[in-house]
Amino acid sequence: MIEYTLSKYLVKRIYAILLSIGAVIGVACLIVILSLFHNYYLSSEKVFMGIHPHIEIHKNMTEDKSHDIINLLKKECPEIINIQPALYMKVETEISKVDRTKAFCVKEKESMTCYSDSDDSKKLHTRYGFHIIEKQSVNFLLKGIRVHKNQAVMDFKRLINGSSDLQRLEQTQDTNHKAVLKAFYMEQGVFNCVSGYFLMQFKGFSPFRQQYRLNGTINMGTKKGNNPLLIMSLANAQNAIEKKNFINTFEISIQSPYHADKIAQKLSTILDSSYNINTWIQKEKASFTFLTIIKWMIFSIIFSISIVAAISIFSTLYLTVLENRKKIAILKALGMKDASIYIIFLMKTFSIGLLGTFFGCILGYAGSYSLIHLFRDSLEKLGLEDPQPLITASDISVVAICTIFLFLLTAIVPARNAVKIDPIQGLNQ
Amino acid sequence: MAKPIICVKKLNRKYNLIEGKQLISKQQIFNNLDFTVNKGEFVSVVGPSGCGKSTLLNIIGTLDSIDDKNYVKVMNAVNDKGDVKETSMPEIEGSGSIWVNEQDISLLKGNKKSEFINHNIGFIFQFHHLIPELTALQNVALPMQIQGMSKKKSILAAMKLLDDLELSNHANRKPEILSGGEKQRVAIARALINNPCILLADEPTGSLHPQFKKGIIDLFIRLNKEKGITIVMVTHDINSLYDDQDRLIISRLFSLSNAPINRMSCEHIENNDIN
């Protein structure tokens, strides 16, 4: 194709190289930015989906009555994958981290007396025989949940540091049929540990401290609520606040989490107005708005970069046309059609755009890999969990289409100028 | 009876000379110019500088139009009474009709015009106008590729043509390392590659060393006689059109000027009155 041959000669090699380098760098930057944004978005989404069921229905009722509601909703709403009763409550808790191994107990006539073996004097150290390492008073959001086949309705397994065996929440005996302590999960950061033994007293509900073991912590990244999460089994939660057979929440997971609002609307028509229905999207509205703002900011930056790129491509091609007025005039005098002259410039920019996209994607992947590798710690501190170079096919398609479209768009005016060159004036140049 | 291949009738053309916003004067280039070239003729258009030789050639070759109504300038024209009035005026005004190879060229626009040039006209310019980045062979093959011919076929045809013009040794050389005469012969080969019915040569020997001039004119004569190509050549070098015995070696001369031409054998010259 003669247009392709001529496009190689008309656009100076140095210009083509500079434009290609520009395209490669531009595309690589886009890929790196998109990759980081993906990491951030996925981290946020993972946390949002981990700490909320897709839909929550709130109403105080007995657990027995909840079965009727669950059956009704399952029947009327086939989109529901899992629905379980739960107990959500804000509780003021005195929580103590204890070291149980350092205490031993001696059964005496009527009672048990516990001594600390770390204390040489063998003096009575605590009433319950635990060595209290740290004690805090925390306002937790207690979530008592049901676990079915090692799965909860909330997808918080991915956020767990420690044991992700959720069955332990409901475990009361070990394999030797000996009683085990009640398990719980707690938001990371309240105590600096992922396992251990704790004493908890829920103020206003029970005068007694109860023994628990921490199964793991929930890593919420930068997402910190006012009330740290405390998750245990529904039965244990009911027992802790001394409200047996009481629930106040239905946790629901659905097939398409992003359709939660629509399903919630449907559920509101099934249930009466005494039920309060929320979705994870509504609960994280502020976070989603924040993400949207970030997304738009990134697009604004990319758009600004694109404008600068477009201006440089435009001026380079404009200069090329000015420099090649004579050659274009010769081609016209030889009978080259206007469309072919257009094609010469569009083909050149298309090939530069394509080349830039290809190598830019490779450089972008390598760049985001290196960046993530080098700054992993900093990125993790920023809330990106296990950052990876995430480049999807749709990202590459969008970047490629935008780059090539931009190149072609900026080539139109210079190509049009080339077409308009008067052959007489061009030849006399 | 000879068949006319170029027929120019009542061609008028004037330039409005505009300086700033003032119309300075109107310069008449052609005044009812009639000019006919028959098929197979070798005609040389002569005349002093600025008389419109190249313009005529460019109009015949459709590179230029008879008038340029699109090129309009808004200006303050001063009328006879001295009043200044804002008006718009084409910078180039013209009229007349031109038929080339049975085609009214004023009707040719866009792609049709390009196709017409590509199929019917071979241009040869004073400064050869080869594309410097392409080799001689690529330059010659270019019009054929523009026509849509495959690269392989066009290169074969170009090679054959270069061979005919004894340039096959220079086929893979770029214009910058060719001599003036060689460049012009490559340009001629490029003009001939699509077998045009008309060759329009604008001062083809103007930039050449005298030793190459005769070779180029001889080549034109050979092409005219052997291939029957109609040639219209603009030149101010009338001497090159005469042989040693002072005989005109082309079909005829056509002058665009009334001024005497500095040559003994002026009886061959047709004059076009300029009023």
Image: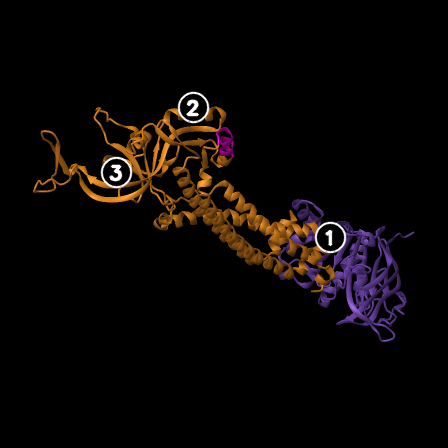
Chain colours: A orange, B purple
Instruction: Identify the mark nearer the N-term, 2 or 3.
Output: 2
Q: Please, which chain is the residue tagged with disc 2 on?
A: A
Mark 1 falls within which chain? A
Q: In terms of depth relative to the viewer, which is nearer, A327 or A183?
A: A183
How far apart are the two marked residues, 2 and 3, measured between alpha carbons?
Answer: 33 Å
Q: Amino acid at mark 3?
A: Gln
Closer to us: mark 2 or mark 1?
2
Q: Position of residue A247 (x, y in %)?
A: 37, 30
- Secondary structure at badge 2 equals helix
Q: What's the magenta region?
A: A262-272
Q: Which residue is mark 1?
A: A335
Is B134 left or right of A396, judged from the image as shown? right
Give the x, y percent position of residue A311.
Answer: 58, 58
Q: Residue furthest right?
A: B1
Q: In the rendering, which numbered label is found on residue A68?
A: 2
Amino acid at dot 1: Gly
